[in-house]
Image (tube, coloured by chain):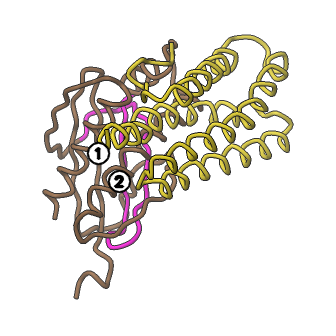
Amino acid sequence: MMDKLYKAFVDATSHVFQLMLNIPEISAHPEKTLKCDEAVDIAIGIVGDLQGEVVYRFPVATSLNMVKIMSGMEFDAVDVFVTSAISEVANIISGNVLTALSGGDLRCDILPPVQQKPDEGKAYEIESSCCICTAIGEICLEIRLNRASHMLH
Amino acid sequence: MLWKDQYELGVPQIDAQHKELFRRVESFLQVLRSGGNWEEKVPKLNETLEFMKRYVVEHFHDEEEYQRSINYPGYEAHKQIHNGMVIYVQEVTKQYEASGNKEDLMQQFGGRLLAWLINHVAAEDQRIADYAKGRG
């Protein structure tokens, strides 16, 4: 299950970066400790057969580069506009992941993106972190999910 | 330039509308992101917002008609995506007007619109072109 999810997120990120930002190559590696201090944290809630959240950590430099490529404009700080654009990219990646997973047995939906750090207080059955390296900087992902009760039987 | 030639679908009417949409969004973003007094920018932003509300509906309608004309199998799903965006634009406009033209709301709208439009045209609309090419 974890391998499948991990691959789905990496593939979706790669696809979205290629289409939206013209960045053809990315690489991913599992990461236990996320090293980005100043980051835009976007949480996408997941409901359905899997329940929990995926938190995308976009370091400030990565965020500014992404918005610069999309708009052709210069940005020197993260503001409401940048956060909103980055949130939509996280939303698009998550939507692509769920579309890919729906080809199998999993039925899930996503909630609108919100700017927040991972919820450290809850325990999850499936927990994983990874960092995705791109030509414009890293993106870190924290996946925290439980199987819905009807999936446990 | 916000528009990139790789976004072309090969359908002249839709491509022309996409280019106009990108041109208007680019102009909107330039005013939105320019320095200076917010109140002075409001009339120009409101004018573009009004245009986009009308144009987006017109463009979505034309694009959906094209999809029907080629029996595009993803028509219903694509229409739902369009409807979602129309509802979002209407809701933001209401909130923006009710707030007395609050800048944060428009900055938030601009950021989401930018990413949504690029993904929609580069990914969702390209599927229509791929299908049309596939049927020859």
Report which residue position mark 2 lands on.
A54
**Within the magenta stretch, is there residue B26?**
no
Report which residue position mark 1 lands on.
A141
Location of residue B6 in the rendering, given as x and y in whole percent from the top left corner: 38, 22
Question: Which chain is mark 1 on?
Answer: A
- Farthest residue in the front direction? B136
Disc 1 marks a residue whose amino acid type is: Leu
> Which residue occupies 56% across, 21% down?
B19
Other-residue count near label 2 (Cα within 10 Å), few / some / many at <14 / 14–19 / ≥20: many
Q: Colour of chain A?
A: brown
Q: Nearer the viewer, residue A44 or B57?
A: B57
- Farthest residue in the bottom direction? A153
In this view, A9 is above or below B35: below
> Which residue occupies 42% across, 17% down?
B5
Q: Colour of chain B?
A: yellow
Where are the magenta residues, as a range? A34-59
